[in-house]
Image (cartoon, rainbow, N blue to C red):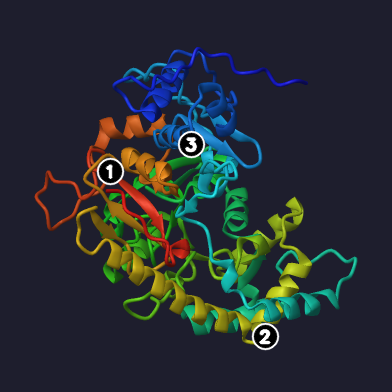
Amino acid sequence: MARRALELPLAADRDGAEPLTAQIAGQLRDAMADGRLATGERLPSTRTLAGLLGVSRTVVTAAYAQLFAEGWVEGRHGSGTFVAEGAPGRPAEPGEPEPVLPPRAARGTRDGLPELDGTSMIDLRPGIVWTEGIDRAAWRRAWRSAGTGVTGDLPDPRGRADLRAALTGYLRRSRGVHCSADQIVVTRGVAGSLGLLASLLRPGDQVGVEEPGYPAARAVFAAHGLRVVPCPVDSGGLRVDALPEGLRLVYATPAHQYPLGARLSVPRRRALTAWARDSGALIAEDDYDGEFRYDVAPLPALFGMDPEVVVYLGTTTKILTPALRVGWLATSPGLAARLAAAGSMLGDWASGPAQGALLSMIATGALERHIRRMRHDYARRRAAMTAAFRGGDAGRLLGDEAGMHMILETRQPAAEVAAAAAERGVAVATLDQKRPGPGLRRRRARRRGPWLRDPRRAPDQPLISPRQGSFVVAGANAHTRMWSLA
């Protein structure tokens, strides 16, 4: 079926008072608000629209980036840019039921970010690992080893026994996680692990997710019919004292809160496990980049405090490459057996050859050597980024002690800074892209006010507010590419 062409009276006035980027973004915003552009409708590619309007492609790219930052559009891998569901139309009135918003990350590229249309922009968005640092010889050896034992048998839904045994040693050495092989289930990554956990819950059950937090976690839970409840965070991580009643599970990133970068303190860790015990809930601990800390040694995992209520989630996405699609979870033996049974019934398991390749890298020590190299390399890039912002003129850095991304708290609205960066050929992600969709943000704003406060400041002074704005900078790709927004 032929795709209907976009027919809108767009214009770019070079003599107008507004910049071209603002003109284009404003006209598209109006068209989505009054329904001329409907939910799910595909926008022209940046190249096509730039040709129609007679402007440069970077101008259109910047306009799209601003609309994405505001929640009006979403990117879909390999397909282009579309009007986001929940974006068009008038705001909901108080008491009016909000539309159920789709999980943006499930339909987009990394964390739902729009594609760059093949442009040669410097991509500083989070979620991009530096795969050039992988030892190619070790990588080839791992896959040759994996290729020697290929069979036609269905894989064990728990994962290869020898890989699970190797993972017990790796987790003990790298993350202080003490568990046996029968407590581990090999999965397709964090999303796969969350999907198995979600499959054991009933549609309509409430699950808590940090706000702001990882969009893919919200996407997985929503796809399973679960009710996603935003849980506030502050400069100390997840606020355990503000967890709502009725949660069956809470998703948390205690080692390095995503995306703000806070570390969950020991008192809060104890409070969180006690809360789980008292409420009968589970904690899904996503240790997505716990191996990378630059001020002190990597922090022990929350799992060690109470393995009966904590499900530890690990993945090769950040330590190696997302292309491998292998992760793992560690939990009590009983729950591990139930999760493996669910995976078997759903046919949801990690690739056998990929498991073999990971086993080879752990057994030969190649994985831990790679992590040590990358920790040194990421520390060097972190130092370059912090040096670039040391003067404080552009804003204040947060969460730069660990992980592969950091936050820049700006004095200007984040969307404006992101658009200015895009015009200069640099792609960054705003913090709004890590929050729920527009409808849920409106509802929460009426109920709670600013979502993040610093105890060192006055009670009415938020650490990060919508007026200040913040955007995420991915340190993994920073290396020597510096820029100025001045």
N-terminal label among 1 and 2: 2
| Closer mark to the observer between disc 1 and disc 2 | 1
How far across and down, in percent of the image, does residue 107 sit? 59, 39
Quarter residue 336 falls in? bottom right
Vertical placement of residue 180 versus 71, above or below: below
In this view, the mark in front (3 or 2):
3
Looking at the rendering, which quadrant does residue 383 occupy? Answer: bottom left
Q: Is residue 198 visible?
A: yes
Label 3 sits on residue: 61
Q: Which residue is mark 1?
A: 469
Number of numbered discs visible in the structure rendering: 3
Q: Is residue 125 above or below residue 312?
A: above
| Residue at the image position 56 percent from the left and 69 percent from the top | 332
Q: Which mark is residue 425?
A: none
Identify the element where label 3 is drawn: helix
- The amino acid sitting under disc 2 is Ala
Using a 10 Å C-alpha cutoff, classify the residue at mark 1 as few (fewer than 14 neighbours), some (14 to 19) or many (20 or more). Answer: many
Kind of element beneath mark 1? loop
Query: Residue, x 27% and y 44% (percent of image)?
Result: 451
Mark with earlier residue (1, 3): 3
* Residue 233, x across and y down, in percent: 31, 52
Report helix, strand or loop for mark 2: helix
User: Mark 3 to mark 2: distance in Å?
Assistant: 46 Å
Amino acid type for the residue under numbered disc 1: Gly
- Kindly identify the residue that appears in the image at 46 percent across and 51 percent down: 214
Left or right: residue 63 compared with residue 447:
right
Q: Would you say the residues marked 1 and 3 are in contact, meaning their CB atoms lie under 8 Å apart?
A: no
Q: Quadrant of residue 184?
A: bottom right
Residue lying farthest to the bottom in this orientation: 364
The disc at residue 363 is 2
The kind of residue tagged 3 is Thr
